């Protein structure tokens, strides 16, 4: 893992409480699909990699599963422990997944949500496979930002502010993808050679934000967190003015939650 990538993945720990409050969760149907597709029994044990504040953990804990959560960020782990305090079958360990000593053949399901983007695939897949029982499965899922007609062009206009005020955050000028244009992880998972057929599911939904809640959301993104404070304040003021003057104080963001489930070969 590059030093930059390693540094960026720790930034969320600085804003753990805000992250817990404003980051979007996942559709309830996803959790039902994970249980169904993975074939985990009610007595099964789950390993979660990078649980954050427990947003994806709670729905599985509510279903009664025993869960071991691995979380790199100390503050994130503390919030997760608080959110999961009423579920004695859930344990949160504050450690990097790369440093965690594997419990081999101990888990019926390994899940990893948004944190998967910060892992080195060459390490992560092998370690997940070693942790699974012979009939075990992995479930990887996260939210993608996609085009929504309901946004009324906001994200095209705000891109101009990025180019003018924070060009270092502009990766490319491609338009937001539509649902069918989102890149797939199926090929990557299959090429590892550790897992069988990959089952894909997706869930399309919108979320609405006022200017304050949208800026709070941006304050949980690694690149935005790392901006110089004065530059960030100027940039955020410009976004708030755009939302409040041209978009009547409210915007809609399109999400596509993608899910990949595969059993161990």
Image: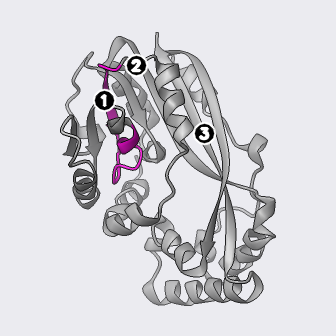
Sequence-first tag of 3 and 2: 2
Q: CA distance from mark 3 to mark 2?
A: 20 Å
* Image coords of residue 248 (percent x, y): 73, 83
173 or 263, which lies in front? 263
- Residue 52 part of the magenta-drawn span: yes
Give the secondary structure at mark 2: loop
- Number of residues whose C-alpha sits closer than 10 Å to that of mark 3, classed few (under 14), some (14–19) or many (20 or more): many
Residues shaded magenta: 42-59
Residue at x-position 71% and y-position 62%: 172
* Image coords of residue 67 (percent x, y): 27, 33
- Residue 146 part of the magenta-drawn span: no
Residue at x-position 77% and y-position 70%: 156
Report if residue 194 is visible in the image: no
Sequence-first tag of 2 and 1: 2
* Image coords of residue 178 (percent x, y): 78, 49
Residue behind mark 3: 258
Left or right of residue 68, residue 180 in this image: right
Residue behind mark 2: 40
* Label 1 vs label 3, nearer the camera: 1
Sequence-first tag of 1 and 3: 1
Asked if the residue under mark 1 is in contact with the one under mark 2, i.e. CB atoms within 8 Å, the reply is yes
Give the secondary structure at mark 3: strand
* Image coords of residue 10 (percent x, y): 34, 59
- Number of residues whose C-alpha sits closer than 10 Å to that of mark 2, classed few (under 14), some (14–19) or many (20 or more): some
* Label 3 vs label 2, nearer the camera: 2
Residue behind mark 1: 65
Residue at x-position 52% and y-position 41%: 28
Picture quadrant of residue 17: bottom left
């Amino acid at each position: 893992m590059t030093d930059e990538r390693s540094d960026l993945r720790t930034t969320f720990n600085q804003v753990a409480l805000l992250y817990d409050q404003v980051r979007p969760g996942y559709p309830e149907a996803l959790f039902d699909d994970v249980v169904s597709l993975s074939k985990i029994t009610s007595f099964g044990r789950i390993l979660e990699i990078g649980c954050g504040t427990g947003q994806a953990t709670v729905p599985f804990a509510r279903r009664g599963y025993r869960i071991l959560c691995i979380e790199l960020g100390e503050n994130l782990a503390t919030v997760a422990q608080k959110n999961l305090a009423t579920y004695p079958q859930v344990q949160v360990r504050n450690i990097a997944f790369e440093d965690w000593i594997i419990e081999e053949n101990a888990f019926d399901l390994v899940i990893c949500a948004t944190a998967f983007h910060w892992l080195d695939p060459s390490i992560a897949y092998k370690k997940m496979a070693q942790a699974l029982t012979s009939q075990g499965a992995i479930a990887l899922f996260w939210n993608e930002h996609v085009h929504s007609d309901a946004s009324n062009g906001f994200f095209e206009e705000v891109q101009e502010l990025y180019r003018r005020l924070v060009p270092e955050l502009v990766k490319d000028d491609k338009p937001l993808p539509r649902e069918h244009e989102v890149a797939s992880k199926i090929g990557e998972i299959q090429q590892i050679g550790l897992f069988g057929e990959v089952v894909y599911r997706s869930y399309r939904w919108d979320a609405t934000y006022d200017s304050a809640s949208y800026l709070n959301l941006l304050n949980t993104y690694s690149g935005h967190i790392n901006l110089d404070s004065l530059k960030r304040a100027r940039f955020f003021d410009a976004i708030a003015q755009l939302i409040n003057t041209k978009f009547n104080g409210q915007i809609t963001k399109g999400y596509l939650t993608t899910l990949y489930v595969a059993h161990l070969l």
